[in-house]
Amino acid sequence: MRADRHEALVDFLLEAVADEGTTPFPANVLTGMRRVVRCDAVSYLEWDPQDLLEFSLAADDPASILPVWDAYPQVRSDDPLAGGAPRANSLPNREWLGRPLAISDFISDREFRRRGLYAEVCKPLGVRAVMKVFLPTGRATGASLVFDTTRSRFTETDRRTLERLVPHLGQLRRNALARRTYPALMDSTAAARMRLLRLTPRERVVLARAAAGETNTVIAQALFVSPGTVRKHLEHVYDKLEVRTRTQAAAIYTRERVFLESPGLDP
C-alpha cells in the first residue's frame, strides 16, 4: 500500500473512532472513507424487509444524487448486487458478507450498459463502476457500503484497501449501535444498584455466592452457618430486590458487576 493511501486509512480510522454518535457511518465519517477508497460517492444503508433503517451519503453534491436514486427500486432487479430496497427477500446473499464486490464481477461492462440500472441511475450521474461491501449484522437486517466512481473501474488497490477495512467497519457499526443502549443500560443498572443498597453485608455476600452458582449447602459451609440460614438470607434478598427467584436476583447482581467492571464506563 502506498504511503499516501496508508496515511488516509489511518486518518479515517482515527476520525471514525472519535465519532461518538449513535448512527453508523454518518456523512462526516463517509467523507473520510472517500479518501481511502477513491470514489465520487459513498453511501451507507441498513434495512430490513420492511423499512430502510439507516441511510447516509458523502459526495461533492449529494442533493443532486438523491433524486436520481429514487429510480433504484424500479430497476433493482438489474443489480446483481441488489440490496438496500426494503421488500421481501431483500437481505444480501450470505456469501457476499465482508467481501468487496463490484458489479463487473458478475456482468460485463456491455451488459451493464444495456440494463435499466445504468440508464436510469448510473448514466445520469456519470457513474461507470459500482463496488459494494455487505457487513455482517447478526440479525435479520442488511447493511452495505456502496462506492460509485466515474472512472472505468475500481482498482485492485481500492479493493485490497477495503478488504483491510472490513473488520474495522464491522466494529465501528457495532460501537455505534451499542452507544444507543448505554442510556437504557445506565438507567436499569442505577435502579438495580438502589435495590442492592438495601441488602446487609451478609445478604450481599450470600447473593454474590449464589450468583456464582454455589448451592445453599456450599454457601453455608463457606460462611459457617446452616443451609436454613442461607435460605432465610436469600428470602430477605428476594424481598428487598423485589424478585421471586434465585435467577432473577442473580441477574440483578450480575448486571451491576458487568457494568462496573466494563472499561470506559463510570459507576
Image (cartoon, rainbow, N blue to C red):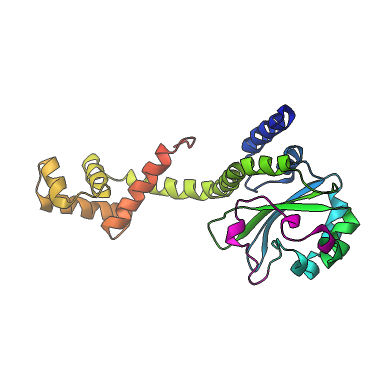
Please tell me how many numbered marks the rendered image carries. Answer: 0
The location of residue 249, given as percent across then percent down, is 30, 53
Which residue is more in the foreground, 86 or 155? 155
Q: Quadrant of residue 247?
A: bottom left
**Residue under the point 67% across and 50% down:** 100
Q: In this rendering, does residue 195 appear at all?
A: no
Give the vertical position of 15 relative to 146 (above or below).
above
Indicate the quadrant containing the N terminus: top left, top right, bottom left or bottom right.
Answer: top right
Seen in the picture, residue 133 relative to 117 is either above or below; the reply is: above
Q: Which residues are magenta?
A: 87-111
> Residue at 69% across / 35% down in the picture?
12
Extreme top residue here?
3
- Within the magenta stretch, is there residue 102? yes
The residue lying at 72 percent from left, 39 percent from top is 157
Mark yes or no: residue 41 visible.
yes
Magenta run includes residue 3? no
Left or right: residue 19 compared with residue 148: left
Location of the C terminus (image quadrant) = top left
Q: Which one is in front, 38 or 72?
A: 38
Corner quadrant of residue 60: top right
Horizontal and vertical percent for residue 70? 82, 63
Q: Is residue 105 left or right of residue 247?
A: right
Q: Is residue 226 left or right of residue 101?
A: left
Query: Left of 5 or right of it: where is 220?
Result: left
Residue drawn at (62%, 59%), measured in percent from left and top?
A: 142
Where's residue 177, x and y in %?
A: 57, 49
Residue 29 location (% of width, % of height): 71, 41
